[in-house]
Amino acid sequence: GAVVSQHPSWVICKSGTSVKIECRSLDFQATTMFWYRQFPKQSLMLMATSNEGSKATYEQGVEKDKFLINHASLTLSTLTVTSAHPEDSSFYICSAPGTSAYEQYFGPGTRLTVT
Amino acid sequence: AQTVTQSQPEMSVQEAETVTLSCTYDTSENNYYLFWYKQPPSRQMILVIRQEAYKQQNATENRFSVNFQKAAKSFSLKISDSQLGDTAMYFCAFMKLSGTSYGKLTFGQGTILTVHP
């Protein structure tokens, strides 16, 4: 089956710095990828839709300037958390659709801790 | 906007027994998919089962089956012969099939299921 990877799996950064999270589709191309945020023992909340070759589409309430998304190629999307603060600490998960949209392949997630 | 509600924050079941997780949703759409995902302690999201709204027949996947009541907007998951490996957080999710929401998933709050030996 299709595989989506994320890197890093866990990152610790200091408050005020920026951190980049990568999402890659390893054996298929994805013109669209989705970024979700999950707090401990809570639901996944869609943050944005990453579109290859165009700007990302952000969900209501998500700060575009804080969560920068770049879909650099058909296999790579990146999420950069700028000027991170402790409240940005969370689990970030990406997904990419397969041949059909109902086939969603999830990355293993990235745990971000801001100190 | 679509909403998905899971009213059971936690459930427990004995190994080999059957458990049902509840999910209700609200939408004005007619064409959509419903899903149950499992998130074990590794936090990797795993698809358990999928239901297409236009299909009246309830989906089944081995020990997992759903009770899809479209008019009532209800989508419960039944796990038969529960196994220790079923211990996880389970999410009900909705996907609209039209417009700009294509491919986006709306998740319920999740139900933590613990299977006891």
Image (tube, coloured by chain):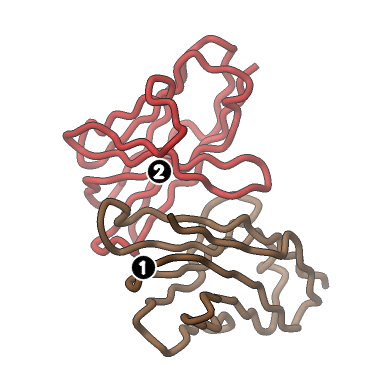
Q: Quadrant of residue B15?
A: bottom right
Q: Quadrant of the N terminus of chain A?
A: bottom left
Q: Quadrant of residue A11?
A: top right
Q: Quadrant of the C terminus of chain A?
A: top right
Which residue appears at 28% of the width and 59% of the height?
Answer: A98
Could you say where residue A61 lies in the image, as x and y percent from the top left?
46, 33
Which residue appears at 82% of the width and 70% of the height?
Answer: B116
Residue sitting at the far top = A16
**Which of the labelled discs sits on residue A5, or is there none?**
2
Q: Colour of chain B?
A: brown
Which chain, by letter, is red?
A: A
Could you say where residue A56 lies in the image, as x and y percent from the top left?
29, 34
Q: Is residue A49 left or right of residue A31?
A: right
Query: Are the numbered discs 1 and 2 placed on the same chain, yes or no?
Result: no
The three-letter code of the residue at mark 2 reads: Ser
The three-letter code of the residue at mark 1 reads: Glu
Q: Is residue A103 left or right of residue B11?
A: left
Tell me the element at label 1. Answer: loop
The foreground one among B23 and B113 is: B23
**Which of the labelled discs sits on residue B19, or is there none?**
none
- CA–CA distance in space, label 1 to label 2: 32 Å
Q: Is residue A33 left or right of residue A13?
A: left
Which residue appears at 42% of the width and 43% of the height?
Answer: A94
Task: For mark 1, name the chain.
Answer: B
Which residue appears at 49% of the width and 46% of the height?
Answer: A108
Tell me the element at label 2. Answer: strand
The foreground one among A87 and A26 is: A87
Q: Nearer the viewer, mark 1 or mark 2?
A: 1
Could you say where residue A7 lies in the image, as x and y percent from the top left?
44, 33
Q: Residues within 10 Å of mark 2 (few under 14, many from 20)?
A: many
Could you say where residue A35 lies in the image, as x and y percent from the top left?
41, 41
The residue indicated by pointer 1 is B29
